[in-house]
Image (cartoon, rainbow, N blue to C red):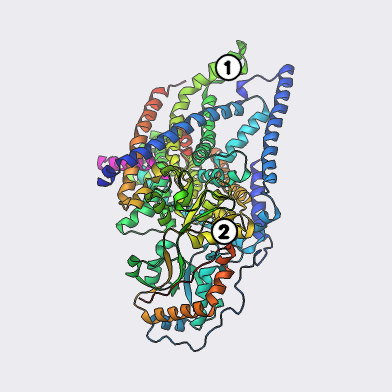
Amino acid sequence: MRVRTLAAVLLAGALALTACGKEGSPTDTAAPAGLFEVAKDVKVDGSPTFEKIKTRGSLIVGVKEDQPGLGYKDPTTNKYSGFDIDIARLISAKLGFDPEKIQFKTIQSAAREQALINGDVDYYVGTYTINAGRKEKVSFAGPYFVAGQDLLVKKDNTDITGKDTLKGKKVCSVTGSTPAKRIKDEKLTEEGNVLEFQGYSQCVTKLLNGEVDAVTTDDAILKGYAAAEDGKLKVVGKTFSSEPYGIGLPKDDKALRDKVNDVLQASLDDGTWQKIYDGTLGKSGSTAEKPKIDRY
Amino acid sequence: MSVLTNNLDLFLRAFGQTLQLFAVSAVLSLVLGTLLAALRVSPVPVFRGVGTTYVTVVRNTPLTLVFVFFVFAYPLLEILKIDEYTAAVVALTLYTAAFVCEVVRSGINTVPVGQAEASRALGLTFTQMLGNVVLPQALRSVVPPMTSTMIALLKNTTVASGFAVFQAGNIRETLADQGDNVLIGLLWVALGFVILVMPLTYVQQVFEKRWSVAR
Amino acid sequence: MSMVLFDVPGPKARVRHKIMAVVGIAAVAAALVYVVMRFVVTDQFTARRLDWINYKQIQLSLVEAIGNTLSAFAVGAVLALLFGAIFAAARLSDHAWVRVPAAVIVEVFRAIPLVIMMFFFYYGLPVAGVKLSAFTAVVVSLMLYNGSVLAEIFRAGINSLPKGQSEAAYALGMRKTQVMTFVLLPQALRAMLPTIISQLVVLLKDTALGFLITFEELLRWGTRIGGDAVNFGRPMIPVMIVVALVYIGLCLLLTWLATYLEKRNRRNKKVIKTDNPDAQKPVLMDASAAG
């Protein structure tokens, strides 16, 4: 009996190791080729970060990996895709570096400031809300997107139309996150009706099963999930907070910040920004307003 | 100290929930575990096989995995909708029952063979023999390890923290939301468990000494 | 083993048992069929939901996740064994100032849930400016909890050895430390080997608690791939079945090792028969203290 179990385990292990693996992804998430033209002979005078990148010859960019449509790492290819990722690629191209050669590094929310201070990443693009507290430690270019807390519900749901219709409904969000705290602080629903899990993906599972009525966080993140679930979910579209997403840069690198702001402004003007949006978050069916660059 | 006194209500509510979760799962797992033990000593080989398979599978599966299954995978089967609290009770019960079963079974094994033989000579049926002769005698060698199993269950209720069930393990989240000192808060939670567990350990040791009668 | 509870069945009983067996098999089969039916009806085993297993990157990440689980187990086990040996020796010390604090530490760490310890190291300590990685938090918690349990197991093992062992060692002029390290501990280790290994099985299962503090181990890998809506339409059920099989396989391997060592031990004449039949007791109790 024991020997048989052992044999079965070894067999399973051997199978797993020798199985001829497929390469590539079942869903093609690569950015359209040629979207980003690599600029030549770029100069950013007085930027220590840029000098560092130049000596290295490639970029290291901090991103998120668990938000489809925004910053998502495909487990089948280990390739990154999404709105944030394309913005990162755009900046790389305009700084004169091939976007295909970016080294993406997944940085958890709590570790973002430290990664920039330590110089582990050159810049950070990942649902990074600009606020005064963070500005003391790092500097921000952008915003490249203005998100706001919103609600994700099932497509056929008609009773949830905004934050004031949540009474008696079960709302799901991530443990310890600002959106979860806001729901509780403003008493938008009863205390026992706020469910907290470790990731939005787990909340979305619960929503699809009909065990919660709404998932709440920034609309950008919700749009990503709505796009991934092809048509089963919708974002309510009435935001009740303002979260300007910025590109995190090392503090006191004003030269690089100005350069990145120029790049963003140009992309807003020539339609590149819109193309990036349409190819990623726009798939959810919602539209977005263009942000206004804040050169502080 | 202020972390505790300012949030006394939170601590009491959370530990109250822990005890409730514990009590419900304890009763259910004792019932299920004893049934499983009866299966494991039954004269019908198929029943024994079922009991053994259950115990082997569950004892070698992490409790966290059982939780993940009932919270995230089970709802996909669309059988019967259960809320998070029920899912936690089911996970804790199914898991603990396997350990209860082993404790009861090894307790039965400590009862001398002569007892069972004598009951059969008196014409008792299998059920009568088990219920009236063997189990009552097995009880005293069962109580100390059963107390340990229950202590483990009490501590295991904290696993529910990751699965949206409010109990002592979630005190940290609320404290962090309020900006209180999480470090101190967690020390108080730890102390709470020490206070709950220590008397149980003491009782267990007393029973163990008093009942370790030589046969 | 349990055959002692009933007579060899006669013809009537055999018929009755056969009927019960048929009923039993039917009930189990019905339950299994129902579950499998639910799997099929709700499309858990469609090609798309099983496709993930074909991808090289996913296989590699699975191997990596198992590696993380096993390395947390290995480091945790070594540290817990060391902790256990040191504190068992301390609890048997002749000096009260060593014995009492050691006893308090062991009892306290056995009473605190592992989850709370992991939260303490991962979420609590940064408040005081000490940052630990999820891996370190998991390993340190496993060491403290399982080390305390192992200390009790070692102590029971040492207490179960015949008094003559230490008396003879003292008579040979050995010092206390020598008696402990060269005579008592090695024998206790051998006598308690099956128990120690079953506690290690508990430790292996407890690595899964790292899931709660975002340690990238096997279970977290499972929820990540199982929740992948983009590529595979949330294959939670098939992924979790695979994860469970891996855990059960690893634990059975360890248990099998325990049985093998126990058998080998029984053949070995050098092992001293312990005079305390209860020596095995704490084992069973603590093995159930699983997380």
Q: Main secondary structure of the magenta part?
A: helix
Asked if B201 appears above or below C13 in the picture, the reply is below
Three-letter amino acid code of the residue under disc 1: Met
Subunit bearing disc 2: A
- Packing grade of label 2 (10 A; few <14, some 14-19, many >=20) is many
Residue C170 seen in the figure: no
Q: Nearer the viewer, residue C80 or A223?
A: A223
In the rendered image, residues at marks 2 and 1 fall on the same chain: no
**Total residue callouts:** 2
Mark 2 secondary-structure assignment: helix
Place residue C63 in its image quadrant: bottom right
- Packing grade of label 1 (10 A; few <14, some 14-19, many >=20) is many
User: What label sits on residue A226 in the rendered view?
Assistant: 2
Asked if C234 appears above or below C33 in the picture, the reply is below
Residue A148 in the figure: left or right of residue B132? left
Subunit bearing disc 1: B
Q: Nearer the viewer, residue A133 or C257?
A: A133
Indicate yes or no whether the magenta region holds residue C93: yes
Q: Residue at x 30, y 56 (%)?
A: C128
Mark 1 secondary-structure assignment: helix
Asked if A203 appears above or below A96 in the picture, the reply is above
Q: How far apart are marks 2 and 1 (CA)?
A: 62 Å
Q: Residue C172: where, in percent of width, then height? A: 35, 42
Q: Residue B50: where, in percent of width, then height? A: 64, 33
Residue for badge 1 = B129
Residue A97 seen in the figure: yes
Q: Residue B209: where, in percent of width, then height? A: 38, 26
Asked if B182 appears above or below B200 in the picture, the reply is below
